[in-house]
Amino acid sequence: DAPGWVSGSLSDRFRAMRSLTEALAAPLSDADATLQSMEDASPTKWHLAHTTWFWETFLLRDNTSDHHAYHEDWAFLFNSYYEAEGERIDRFARGMLSRPTLDEILAYRRHGTDAMGELCDREELAPLIELGIAHEQQHQELLLTDIKHALFQNPLGPAMWDRSEAAKAQPGEPKSRGWYEHLGGIALLGHDGDGFAYDNEGPRHRTILEPFALSKTLVTNGEWAEFIADGGYESVGLWLSDGWAWVKEYGIEAPLYWRDDEQFTLAGWEARDPAAPVTHISYFEADAFATWAGHRLPSEAEWEAIARGQRPEEERLAHDPMAGNQLDVPASDPSWQIPHPRVEAQGDGLFGNCWQFTGSAYLPYPRFRIADGAIGEYNGKFMSGQNVLRGASCATARGHSRPSYRNFFYPHQRWQFTGLRLAKDL
Amino acid sequence: DAPGWVSGSLSDRFRAMRSLTEALAAPLSDADATLQSMEDASPTKWHLAHTTWFWETFLLRDNTSDHHAYHEDWAFLFNSYYEAEGERIDRFARGMLSRPTLDEILAYRRHGTDAMGELCDREELAPLIELGIAHEQQHQELLLTDIKHALFQNPLGPAMWDRSEAAKAQPGEPKSRGWYEHLGGIALLGHDGDGFAYDNEGPRHRTILEPFALSKTLVTNGEWAEFIADGGYESVGLWLSDGWAWVKEYGIEAPLYWRDDEQFTLAGWEARDPAAPVTHISYFEADAFATWAGHRLPSEAEWEAIARGQRPEEERLAHDPMAGNQLDVPASDPSWQIPHPRVEAQGDGLFGNCWQFTGSAYLPYPRFRIADGAIGEYNGKFMSGQNVLRGASCATARGHSRPSYRNFFYPHQRWQFTGLRLAKDL
Amino acid sequence: DAPGWVSGSLSDRFRAMRSLTEALAAPLSDADATLQSMEDASPTKWHLAHTTWFWETFLLRDNTSDHHAYHEDWAFLFNSYYEAEGERIDRFARGMLSRPTLDEILAYRRHGTDAMGELCDREELAPLIELGIAHEQQHQELLLTDIKHALFQNPLGPAMWDRSEAAKAQPGEPKSRGWYEHLGGIALLGHDGDGFAYDNEGPRHRTILEPFALSKTLVTNGEWAEFIADGGYESVGLWLSDGWAWVKEYGIEAPLYWRDDEQFTLAGWEARDPAAPVTHISYFEADAFATWAGHRLPSEAEWEAIARGQRPEEERLAHDPMAGNQLDVPASDPSWQIPHPRVEAQGDGLFGNCWQFTGSAYLPYPRFRIADGAIGEYNGKFMSGQNVLRGASCATARGHSRPSYRNFFYPHQRWQFTGLRLAKDL
Amino acid sequence: DAPGWVSGSLSDRFRAMRSLTEALAAPLSDADATLQSMEDASPTKWHLAHTTWFWETFLLRDNTSDHHAYHEDWAFLFNSYYEAEGERIDRFARGMLSRPTLDEILAYRRHGTDAMGELCDREELAPLIELGIAHEQQHQELLLTDIKHALFQNPLGPAMWDRSEAAKAQPGEPKSRGWYEHLGGIALLGHDGDGFAYDNEGPRHRTILEPFALSKTLVTNGEWAEFIADGGYESVGLWLSDGWAWVKEYGIEAPLYWRDDEQFTLAGWEARDPAAPVTHISYFEADAFATWAGHRLPSEAEWEAIARGQRPEEERLAHDPMAGNQLDVPASDPSWQIPHPRVEAQGDGLFGNCWQFTGSAYLPYPRFRIADGAIGEYNGKFMSGQNVLRGASCATARGHSRPSYRNFFYPHQRWQFTGLRLAKDL
Ligand SMILES: [Fe+3]
Ligand SMILES: [Fe+3]
Ligand SMILES: [Fe+3]
Ligand SMILES: [Fe+3]
């Protein structure tokens, strides 16, 4: 069953998506939702309000008669980086917003959702609404990774959701590695124009691939433990120069959230499954691991070529962007899975569990142009110093990602569900 | 009427003091009480719990049969700087404690207060209980100044208490300055052993004073505005070298919490009363102002000599440590005053409104010895780089201070209710 | 006449190259040569000694009988980032090396040059010697840009070379802009294996180009002044997000070394020629300027395609890597030009005056492998977070660069002779 | 024989003092004299020039007809912190002054010394000239401690002076500790007005002392080794709170310049004499040691009372400020001693070997007033956050110090010859 935000009328999808946001925040108290644990992260309350501000600013303000700002000061608080939309609160001060309260922000959300009501039926607004849905889905994922980081700071190791004994994953059986092979040649890279995509996924353009192979499996916790045991974090020769400086400055010795045989999860501290994909690693670590393993990271063009399955001999369905371990409705359904990487079921393909580092820098595709206006600030200005990740994680709303989807982070960041899938030349 | 924590049985005083702590936190939500706005400050919840941990660790643990730690992990969370009591949470991580909740901490407080019940009647414990009361009173003041700083970070400028129109102070009439004169000679400095005092207030010892005078009035907001208008913050010659570096690095142009003609208070942003004492200034600022005014800061010995009123010609009663604008019960009584500096009533003497900078470094008195054990860490180890302040502020629990009381802060700190009273040579 | 390091026997070229290094340092005192003005830069003495250490370590040690280290402690001082060659001095401490003296280091250089004598005739060593020549030439350029930065710190603005009145450039006449056009298609990128190249210039591989044009002229000081006058440094919309943060943090308002109508040069402070190419700009600035101008930066593949002149209709000779304003022997010849950007003579082509930013991240080419051993550390480990620049500057030894040459710096760095050449889609 | 700067005509003393400065710099090259190893330190060349700037600015400018600035830009370079004398170079940029050269600065010195010629005979200028002599003597000591710190950064460990085998100190015999006792009472503190003194040494005033004793010996390297062996640097209970934070942040484990059984000296790395006084310790370390030893630091009043020998039963001559291990002419005399702490000869008294920490904060004496004008900036503005040291060190020009002399440094600084002498209550 596809989640409600994937199919049905735009209005239904909009509401299902909004409900998911609120369901994710449901286990949190006002105090939990106020925490900001680092400059890269934002409080849950801020995510809840900012996504509503987005609807208010880019849809409601210009398309409803008699629109009034819900609260005149909140645009200042909940704008993020849209410079064209005026001043905004200093990023670090987001963690000081004990007011407005969580209840006030939830009321703001209800007001926004209701006000959007009829706009969802206006066909000319559909593209903007699709953008708004995608935007809020990105914040759903950030909400989860940000609160995970905040709760991790607490020595009590609080859980966001309790996992029943029954629901606890049995240690999995690691899949044996296999490779998706590609003969090389000219490939088309970028969104094909069918359905929604971000501006940074286009324009579609030709690129040349040399013969290569991409691993069918993600690197696991167990493999990472071997890397550590083999002195991976102490071997300068494995690391990029900037990566080694980072390791030394911060005393990095393991992925984020590791402690002995445990790892911190949204259900608190739990035993680590060696067969599950490793997550919460930086680009620097991914690159060093690949070097250690005698392989390399794929380029984003390689990853996308496999994901598209252009060649008939590949199992096209294996790469269904809707499949794999992604975020579903945290319903009353007891089988609901707390977002966490799990051994991949056979056939999961390239999506799910974690975002996968590529060796590609996040740069504009040929002939990319930044759109005009505030929305135009969206993606282009971040095209410096970051790396592209592909796929989707256990915290990505199922249906949000695509073969052409480009996620991006700085090479030292690792509070997302980030992992890796090796590649090699043929 | 003296507040309940001042007179009556030790048990009654203990309970009244504990109630005050809770009354101060009463207007705050769990989220408010979780905020930590800077490393110098602590969340309200932390103050509430830490003061209880103090009773548990230094009184209940050793003096009640069958004592169990209320929660085994909380000592780690709520220890402050008592190294002898084991590891403690990194100071900056205090702001990440959304759990335990405010309600859980209030339950901890009730449990602690109840458990103390009979101990208050054991005479041999009275000195330690007096210390505990004084300790918690210090945290009451910090609770107020810390939450003020946290709420100030919020662009909405939230109020902790709402001030009714009726209760709003009318602009006061500044008192004309007069001087308390002192002929000099040998004075006794330090606590006389009668009643409770901190270790740092003794031993009592002789000191020599030269003839001097101490202002009868505190410097006011209006006088400070003249200092600013006269280029006080731009005149390097007025400043200590370290003070000037601080002014330049942080772009200091006015006392903390000033904005145009307003100042931030525990009742939110309010008009500033030129006749009221200036507060939230650093030692550097106090010293520069005194230089500008052609006077100087008093030494702590001078301040104490006036406060003691050793000479009959002084109005001894004027310096009653119980008098002046200090913290009383925030009762349902509508006349209760939100802690804020106000024009001093005639006869207020040296106590109340704000802590007053002296030019004295915070150093041990002759023959001071640090006591053994964890409690012994209390004051001695801070005797470097700080300055002594005397008096009591509008946020000091009435009755907490004394003529010999030594408060101390670093020369750049100014989130306390700090002000100044000028001195001059005769 | 080609400089001596370009043609002739390898032995002659080696000696001519070594002489150039010493000629560049000749105007400097021991004290000048000791200065280190920032962590990115090194003292002249360090460059003089480190390049000799390179010959000693990678050539002399293993290929001469009875080799002894010239000084046992100097490997520690003059190793740079070759981890495999052992410990090395903290980068910032390089500026503390008043000893060994400049004379001692020059003696070390003579000893090294002499010891290399016969090795230059051993054919099997030729590739390593070519690498050593290229390595020392890179340090020649760094020597010039580092000492320029150091002398700039001195309020007296000392000149490294005095420019006679006669030699002073007359303000030039800006060339009118034209465009080199390219029809797109499959291009071969990377070194073709003929002659020396760094490992990072290969392997040669196919890439796809869309039709584009590359400016025949470099952006000039005059055009940059227009950018400033038009509010270029104050318009957030022109900047990458990281670039804007850099502008704000460091208060950037103009290229490095600009002051009123002057700029700091190796001949001290001089009037700025509006017709000359702008230099000493960061990638952030180059990108913002291109956006402001309505164009973009070229990719490195585009730049190289034009430089190669694959299409007959282009003036192939115009792109002679030996042509243009590059570094020649600072001989007694009074016509010798102090390294400084000058209006390009017609037909200079793509090389000379300044390194030109591309929009390409510095990443490995497909199938690039890091070579084994210490030399292998050379280029691969810097492939993160940097941008590629192409061409050659007025401080690049003529003959050092090639169409496939990849220079690289971090996006904020600008102490090199860096400039830009615009590109556009066709 | 007293050094030439101590007795004779003012003119002779001025010239002898100037010669000493130059003699101290004589072993240094231009490059050595250009080094600045930290913000607290200045290059030798800067000391040489700044002291000449002082004579030029405060004596020559106003008292010679037709005075011209020696070089119009140099006031900017060589002013230190006299705000009233205009802008000055950023403190850290002092290390970039390869120009002017050492020779040019020595010529400036000769010019200044000659120009002062007749002024030394004008009686009304004598006080200012005495101040200038004292000022330059302070810089003589800084010159030595600053260049020691700079040479220490060099892994080669260069020596400023070579010590002949013959001149190498034999390990000394530690003196047995004895105590100077004082019965307490009213003492006069501060300069008595006879001879030159800095403004901060007055006004003379009464103070009260309790009975105490001051050690006859300085703490030795051997005693410090015991402190280390006993876990002194790992015992939080011994340290001031700020001191412990400093130990942890910088990984402090021993005095500055210690390495195994050696210490870095002005003659390079040498074996450490356990019997010699420990030096290069911070106030934090001195305080922790005193606590560990069961004693305390003296107050400055206590130290001065012993140094004055007010009571007849003390050996007054033992405290001769001219005696002990202090700086003499580094003449051709082979017996000249490179400045370095040595076992004290019996009867050395309180002066020599090292500056001795007191527990007193550096604050104005009662009725101290900052003098008007640029000279007035001299001492008063540093009266915050520093501690007083008394005595004189092996790098203090003999005759420079006095019983009332107040030296002062921040509690973490330790690049001076700083040590300690214990005190205790009686
Ligand atoms: Fe957003
Ligand atoms: Fe406490
Ligand atoms: Fe190199
Ligand atoms: Fe000076």
Image: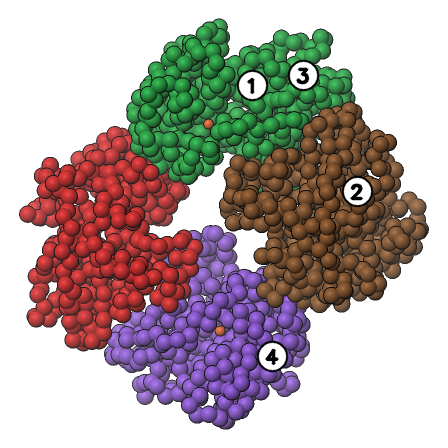
Chain colours: A green, B red, C brown, D purple
Q: Which residue is mark 1?
A: A197
Residues under labels 2 and 1: Cα distance?
41 Å
The percent position of residue A88, horizontal first and vertical second, equals 41, 36
- The chain under label 2 reads C
Element type at mark 4: helix
Residues under labels 1 and 4: Cα distance?
72 Å
The residue under the point 80% across, 37% down is C307
Is there one chain holding both mark 1 and mark 4? no
Left or right: residue A260 versus residue D390 is right
Quadrant holding the C terminus of chain C: top right
- The chain under label 1 reads A
> Pointers 3 and 4 in contact (CB under 8 A)?
no
> Pointers 1 and 4 in contact (CB under 8 A)?
no
The amino acid marked with disc number 4 is: Tyr
Callout in the foreground (1, 3):
1
The amino acid marked with disc number 2 is: Gly
Q: Which residue is mark 2?
A: C349
> Pointers 3 and 2 in contact (CB under 8 A)?
no
Q: Which residue is mark 4?
A: D108
